[in-house]
């Protein structure tokens, strides 16, 4: 049995955890890609510039470090969720590519800057390990 915060609780419905504590659910089929989910989130969150954002899978390691696996845009969701070792992982929508000039991001896209601010201000001192999946 999967835990409540696991990646896939209901078949073909992906839960994505946002930095503000909200959870967005997405139904998917064999043609749905990571890029489709990101585009939908961009629309739902009123983000203008999406180049700093990505979907990541979060897994807590035995050493109590968070491990974040960056998902590629063209990856089908079925490929992501139907791997047995993804049980217990969470899918997060995160700012993964920090802007060179955060003040410029604030001018261009206040909603994206706010999301970045929430992510940075709410993060704790856990060491993060990113890897591309």
Image (cartoon, helix red, strand yellow):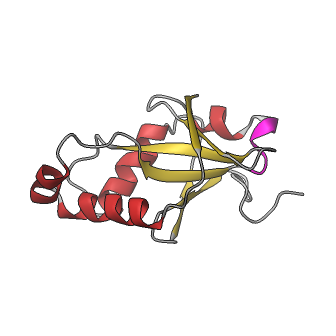
Q: Residue shown at 75%/34% (left/top)?
A: 83
Quarter location, residue 101: top left
Quadrant assignment for the N terminus: bottom right
93 vs 22: above or below: above
| Closer-to-camera residue (58/76) | 58
Q: Which residue of the protein is positioned furthest toward the right in this rendering?
A: 1
Total of numbered circles in the picture? 0
Q: Residue shown at 41%/42% (left/top)?
A: 96
Residue 18 x %, y %: 48, 62
Residue 86 x %, y %: 74, 41
Q: Which residue of the protein is positioned furthest toward the front in this rendering?
A: 125
79 vs 44: above or below: above
**Does 2 appear in magenta?**
no
Residue 39 x %, y %: 35, 48
**Left or right: residue 8 compared with residue 103:** right
Q: Residue shown at 55%/56% (left/top)?
A: 125
Magenta stretch, overall SS? helix
79 vs 16: above or below: above
**Left or right: residue 116 compared with residue 68:** left
| Closer-to-camera residue (38/114) | 114
Q: Which stretch appears magenta?
A: 84-88
**Does 85 appear in magenta?**
yes
Residue 97 x %, y %: 35, 39
Quadrant assignment for the C terminus: top right
**Left or right: residue 117 compared with residue 56:** left
24 vs 84: above or below: below
């Amino acid at each position: 049995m999967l835990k409540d915060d696991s990646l896939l609780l209901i078949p073909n419905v992906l839960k994505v955890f946002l930095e503000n504590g909200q959870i967005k659910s997405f139904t998917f089929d064999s043609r749905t890609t990571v890029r489709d989910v990101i585009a939908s989130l961009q629309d739902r969150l009123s983000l203008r510039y999406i180049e700093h954002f990505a979907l990541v899978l979060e897994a807590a390691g035995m050493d109590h470090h968070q491990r974040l696996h960056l998902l590629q845009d063209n990856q089908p969701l079925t490929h992501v969720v139907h791997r047995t070792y993804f049980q217990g992982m969470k899918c997060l929508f995160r700012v993964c590519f920090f802007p060179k000039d955060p003040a410029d991001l604030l001018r261009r896209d206040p909603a994206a800057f706010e999301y970045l601010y929430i992510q940075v201000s709410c993060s704790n001192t856990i060491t993060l390990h990113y890897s591309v999946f």
